[in-house]
Image (cartoon, rainbow, N blue to C red):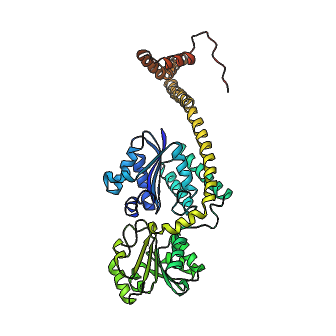
Amino acid sequence: MSLLVLGINHQTAPVALREQVAFATDALPAALTALRALDGVHEVVLLSTCNRTELYAHAEGDGQVLADWLARQAHVGQDLHAYLYRYRDAAAVRHLFRVASGLDSLVLGEPQILGQVKQAWTIARAAGTLGGPLDRLFQHAFATAKRARTDTRIGANPVSVASVAVRLAQDNFTRLDEACVLLIGAGETIELAARHLVEARVKRLLIANRTLAHAQALASRHDGYALPLAALDRHLAEADIVISATASREPILHRPQVEHALRMRKHRPMLLLDLAVPRDIAPDVSGLRDVFLYTVDDLQQAIEDNRRSRQQAAEQAEAIIDLQVARFLEDWQASRRQQPLLHLRAHGEAARAAALARARQQLAAGLAPDQTLELLAHTLTNRLLHAPTVALREALRNGDDPLIEAAARLFPPPGDKPPSDPS
């Protein structure tokens, strides 16, 4: 039994592949149930964000069944395996701690990932796919991430993909106080983008969403104008900048829509920032003149500037993670050493309960107490000794000396004084 992590992220796979294995929130319970049913999988968590899809498991084997399952979801067969990273035990623990602390994010130290990890853990708990070492690992990860942010400046002046996108628009495209910006979506990323745009004194803010009430709620908080997604075509030409981040499985903006908007704008340039995975804006839109289309993978330079500025804090956070990895592994190994004793006691309790229940049935049926006690003792002895007897016979046949010596210590000859109970 091992702790395993496997997945793809912004460092190992392009957005075109990541979007094939991105899971909507409402699809996670069914996916977790399917994963838990795989051979040898005892616990599992599925983390799916715009930058990563990862499986965390407490399972037998090397995780190949998990890798094959993920490849099947992408409909790309063996091609996905070349992009997968895999971590086991100590490396898996370290990876989760780094992810939760924002050290493995596209934007170093971004704060949203911790909430996303917590959401994945909550959904797995509700789906019944947690309840052992993996559950304890996630709780330890939350405490580690909190300490990394408290004890270092990794979380100072929080930066997100949304803030990097707004800064890109502000520094390289147009003055925001003269621009109309269209936001598509109403989730956390769009909320952050709206907040940064308002701080930059954007001239006009349009917010489109499939559920109009959500767009209206967001618009009311940021002095914007809400519109239903169905009205997107009528308003697209007004936008100098479009920032999109929805959970749609298919593109929302297609080339003909943008072409029409450009004609209406007399080909004044448009900046399109697609922060969604799967992508909201069809890739062929990038081929249009007067359009500048960026995806999350295109924000690397601005993100690298942020990464360099936070490098010292990141090194301090890594030191905290090193310590917490060692502590978790120490506790986990100690609990694993306790497992044989716990299993032995559970086996004895189960045997006692079954034998006692049968004896009570026999008494209720009128069997004599002496005969019932005789049967109770015989049944209990057989239940307790069956498994060790079978194992010891096998050891004698195979010459398994360590097990034979252990049996001699566990079951001394009659008359020898057994070791005292340390408890």
Write the residue at 36% across / 48% down: 68
Q: Is residue 314 above or below residue 418?
A: below
Q: Is residue 305 above or below residue 261?
A: above
Write the residue at 54% across / 86% down: 203
Residue 359 at what x, y percent from top left?
A: 52, 24
The answer to whether any part of residue 110 appears in the image is no
Residue 383 at what x, y percent from top left?
A: 49, 23
Quadrant (top left/top right/bottom left/bottom right) for the C terminus: top right
**Quadrant of the rendered image containing residue 309:** bottom right
Residue nearest the observer in this picture, 165 or 416 = 165
Write the residue at 53% across / 51% down: 96
Residue 279 at what x, y percent from top left?
A: 40, 68
Residue nearest the observer in this picture, 325 or 124 = 325
Write the residue at 52% across / 69% down: 302
The answer to whether any part of residue 239 appears in the image is yes
Residue 218 at what x, y percent from top left?
A: 54, 77
Q: Is residue 229 above or below residue 405?
A: below
Q: Give left or right: position of 7 versus 195.
A: left
Residue nearest the observer in this picture, 183 or 150 = 150
